[in-house]
Image (tube, rainbow, N blue to C red):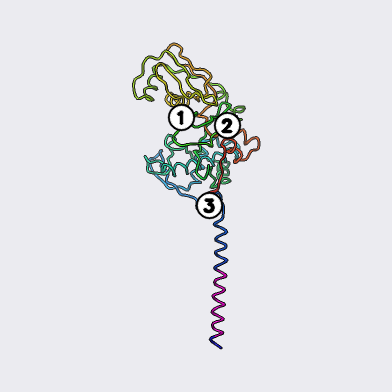
Amino acid sequence: MRVFRKSIVIFSCLLGMILCLSLIVMGCSKQERRPENQKVSEEPTISLYVAENGQTKQIKIEEYIKGVVAAEMEPTWHINALAAQAILARTFTMERIKTTGGVSKRKTDASTDVEEFQAYDPKRINDSVIKAVEMTRGEVVKYEGEYVKAWFFADGGGTTAASAEEGLAYTKTPSPYIKSVKDPGFAITTEENKSWRAEFPLNVVKESLKKIMGKEVGKIDSVKITKKGESGRVMSVKIGDVTVSGPALRLALGSEKMRSALLTKMEVDGEKLIVEGKGYGHGVGMSQWGAKALAEQGKSPKEIINYFFKDIQIVKEWK
């Protein structure tokens, strides 16, 4: 009788354990069915090369993003514009780390040198920047489960580029999430973004072309735009006997002087190349002035990003 009772006790204990395990498994199964775009993990700590002192430091990514947003956008702008910038800056960082390992030259995840990574200036961080980063904590932009190339620029001159090839001459990987849209920022941007003019001495143009071509170029006595993209940006131009891409020429001549490839005039006048155009930047992805305009219209950070990118998902990767 005691043995039977003991067996009953043991059986009851085993049954209880089985029921507990079943509940645990059911709970785990329920968690495992969580959609991929809701998956969260711990906030990453990244290695940052500080160009100002040549040192490397470890920094939480959210703290790093605050310095990027403060440097890449005017910190006094509407908080929703800053928040959209934060999402793209975070995406840019994660995409670069995943695809290239960060900054191989420095053996770090990121760099404060804008030529190597993103602009970064923690001295410009204010309460709005802090709030913008915190309200979008962990949020990144993905296309079909992968980080997008989180391109942004100052002003689209009325319209954004239809593709990365048009605005950046970028064809390395597909970027079907890029689209051409009206840039609402054109109505509120600075006058020099609405219409600008630049003059380049032909000897400067020849040196710039030499950098692109890797060799001396001949006499420059003419210029002709040979191809424009869907948004009107110059994709290729023939200068003298040399044909180069519009984006490459802009970088070689200086992107702050030849403010965009959305040109309204290009001609050789005596010993100078005259260039006139609209906008500021390559035109691919999010217009920062456009983000400002949309934010002032009451659009949320996610609505702003969805305006400039198509078929994308904004997901939260860590709490």
Which residue is label 2 attached to? 289
User: Looking at the image, is mark 1 or mark 2 earlier in the sequence?
Assistant: 1
Q: CA distance from mark 1 to mark 2?
A: 23 Å
Q: Where is 239 relative to 131, above or below?
A: above
Q: Amino acid at mark 3?
A: Val
- Name of the residue lying farthest toward the right: 298
Which residue is label 3 attached to? 40
Q: Report the mark closest to the observer, 1 or 2.
A: 1
- Mark 3 falls on what kind of element? loop
Can I make out residue 204 in this image? no
128 and 69: which is toward the camera: 69
User: Where, by quadrant of the figure, is residue 129 drawn?
Assistant: top right
53 and 142: which is toward the camera: 142
User: Looking at the image, is mark 1 or mark 3 earlier in the sequence?
Assistant: 3
Q: Is 5 colored magenta in this rendering?
A: yes
Q: Are marks 1 and 2 in contact (CB under 8 Å)?
A: no
Q: Where is 260 relative to 150, above or below?
A: above
Give residue 198's position: percent from left, percent from top.
Answer: 49, 19
> Which region is colored magenta?
4-20
Can I make out residue 163 in this image? yes
- Mark 1 falls on what kind of element? loop
The disc placed on residue 254 is: none
- Name of the residue lying farthest toward the left: 215
Q: Amino acid at mark 1?
A: Ala
Which residue is label 1 attached to? 169
